[in-house]
Image (tube, coloured by chain):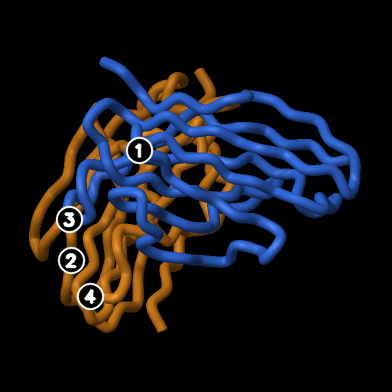
Chain colours: A blue, B orange
Amino acid sequence: AAGVIQSPRHLIKEKRETATLKCYPIPRHDTVYWYQQGPGQDPQFLISFYEKMQSDKGSIPDRFSAQQFSDYHSELNMSSLELGDSALYFCASSLGLTNREQYFGPGTRLTVT
Amino acid sequence: GDSVTQMEGPVTLSEEAFLTINCTYTATGYPSLFWYVQYPGEGLQLLLKATKADDKGSNKGFEATYRKETTSFHLEKGSVQVSDSAVYFCAPLFNAGGTSYGKLTFGQGTILTVHP
């Protein structure tokens, strides 16, 4: 079965650079969630979208922005990168807001040097 | 506020031993409850779920029962295998007053290592 696709899988950036992470949800899934997992930490919710509209917002820095496109894929844009942004970024998708099962992608490992 | 507390690790067991990983939550409403597993170098996989009181989720020999009276969702397995070595996350989905849509709150994660 098709799963959530994230690209790139690995990304290395320098401080103050920008990065764009992409997420392609499972076909027919219309809801996308972004989570950040720091080294040795539990995943923290950043932001979510349902039907191309932001549905919830968590601990996402103002330097980050995200959107969901008409084909339901989502992009997380990160600017003015800091060393502390180094983490694993997960995208998850679900079918609708009331379907509670979220399926996660393999993650993008971002390293800021 | 809503929160989750998960048993601290790491947990080290021998193959075929019994496993329990404790998870308790504090919530103003009635969350849906999930266990996710993260194998080394991989993403998060949904292991099992329970959406209402007394529901029992089960998968791959793992079980967890939604206990409303004790606000708990402990993960158990009767006989662990080396291949079960991973990090396990308890993750309630809180929905207070209908203002939160689907965001999971993860516990601290428990590292399980199973030796042959």
Q: Residue at x 53, y 58 (%)?
A: A46
On screen, A98 above or below B77?
Answer: below
Q: Circle 3 sits on which residue? A: A98
The mark that comes first in sequence, 4 or 2, is: 2
On screen, B90 above or below B2?
Answer: above
Q: CA distance from mark 4 to mark 2?
A: 22 Å
What's the residue type where badge 2 is placed?
Answer: Arg
User: Front-most of A11 and B28?
Assistant: A11
Q: Circle 2 sits on which residue? A: B67
The reply to whether residue B103 is visible in this rendering is yes
Secondary structure at badge 4 equals: loop
Q: Circle 1 sits on which residue? A: A70
Disc 1 vs disc 3: which is toward the camera? 1
Residue B77's spot in the image, x, y percent?
A: 29, 37
Q: Chain of mark 2?
A: B
Callout 1–callout 3 Cβ contact below 8 Å: no
Determine whether, in the image, residue A18 is placed left or right of residue B85: right
What's the residue type where badge 3 is placed?
Answer: Thr
Determine whether, in the image, residue A24 is placed left or right of residue B34: right
Query: Are marks 3 and 2 in one subunit?
Result: no
Callout 3–callout 4 Cβ contact below 8 Å: no
On screen, A14 above or below A16?
Answer: above
The mark that comes first in sequence, 1 or 3, is: 1
What's the residue type where badge 4 is placed?
Answer: Gly
Q: CA distance from mark 1 to mark 3?
A: 20 Å
Q: Circle 4 sits on which residue? A: B98
